[in-house]
Image (cartoon, helix red, strand yellow):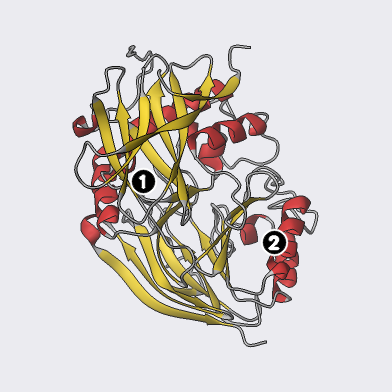
Amino acid sequence: MPNCLTVTTLVLFISLSCSSMSPPQEPKSNESRFSILQGLTWNQGAILSVLRQKSQKLTYHQTSGVVSPSPSATLQATTYELESSPWVVDHIETRLEKNPTYLEIKDSEGQTMDRRQIGQVDLNKSTFKLAITSCMNDRFDKEQEQIWKDLAKDRPEYLFMIGDNVYATTILGPLEKSVDKSRLWDRYVQTRRSLAVFYLDELIPTLAQWDDHDYGTNDGDKTNPYRREAMEVFEAFYPQKAVKGIFTRGPANSFVFDAFQARFYFLDNRSEREPNGSDPGKYAHFGEKQETWLFQSLKSRSIPSWLFMGDQFFGGYHRFESFEGNHAKSFKHFMGILQGIRQPVVFVSGDRHLTEISKIGPPDLGYETYELTSSPVHAKTHPSGWEVRPNRRQLVGADLKINYMIVEGSHSTRSLAMKVTAKSKLQEILFSKDLLIKRSN
């Protein structure tokens, strides 16, 4: 089959050929470097992904110390490839030490071609510093290069890409609804070759979830004929796998990440989503299996929890996509069950091409919490329309600026204290708020 995705594990000795693709122009400073993403990272290890051409002969090494050369270990790679593409993705698992650790990429003659510092994190502590992004349109070349450099200066412990990380749907023709597997792979490659975040000297631990553009269909839902293929492509490009006590997969593309004495749920709002206009009264946004898994998991540990997804939870005030706006009856059912969960929960979303904090309380929930919306990190911005359609829950917001969020704070058993700062390029502060979420009963 010409579009068959294959996976192999080997110690890599993999030569340079020309790509037949025509990706967006990469920044010139990246022409001699590899596109690298540091994915799931825990106290003892990390998984990295490297984009390379099939014909390249490379070896991967882990080194310690600031000066190269230093003692190194050769690393194995698991390779994901599509027969029709000249580009493959290697996943490399490293073991982290207390000293700075580096990934080195060498050619067939043993010459170092690239070297990056691997980010390290202590997941056992209760304090955290997170960066949150969504809507990463690779056509915005100048904007993206600047804002990723700005974000890196904030030195987050983890980066959460929560949707529309790849604008695959930009290639759809006027009569097309979904991107097939081969073209989806190509758009993921183009994005990886283009964005400055994949060329940072010091890598940032990153977890990702999709929304409709990287799912491969605008406003996509469970009717996407390529949804299983889209999952295979997503898993190839984002190095995230089950690690006991750290990363647990749920139904479809959902997962939970245990860190900083809290739980971070990344919900799949596409794979089992009912089409807009269809709402049976429950399970319309996430599907029955995912909601059942979510609430069982929430009840299993009474610690602060975060719920992430691509589009907004509380978006009934506007005409764009949201759980509340598209599936109002199912949203009410979902919130009714969430009301009975003992621990405090915070909501995080993207998609809106603006940023805001919404205060959530009665009648939605019996305690005060918030929804944080961060969008876009680099994509087209739009006027908010708040003067026509005000958000009655809004605490603060900003529009017409590309942006990302830095969230830093601490968890305790029944509470979450945090400072939320929205920034635009050149680290312009759009707003900053201190928030406390506490549940006493």
The residue at 47%/66% (across/down) is 372
- Residue 317 lies left or right of residue 206; in this view the side is right
Q: Residue furthest bottom?
A: 440
Q: Indicate the secondary structure of the residue bearing disc 2.
A: helix
Q: Amino acid at mark 2?
A: Ala
Give whichever of discs 2 and 1 has the lower sequence position: 2
Left or right: 26, with 87 as reference point: left
Residue at screen point 30% across, 21% down: 107
Q: Which residue is mark 1?
A: 380
**Mark carried by residue 404:** none
- The residue under the point 31% across, 34% down is 104
Q: Quadrant of the C terminus?
A: bottom right
Circle 2 residue: 328
Q: Do the residues bearing badges 2 and 1 touch, measured as CB atoms within 8 Å?
A: no
Percent of width and height locating residue 384: 41, 60
Q: Helix or strand or loop: what does disc 1 sit on?
A: loop
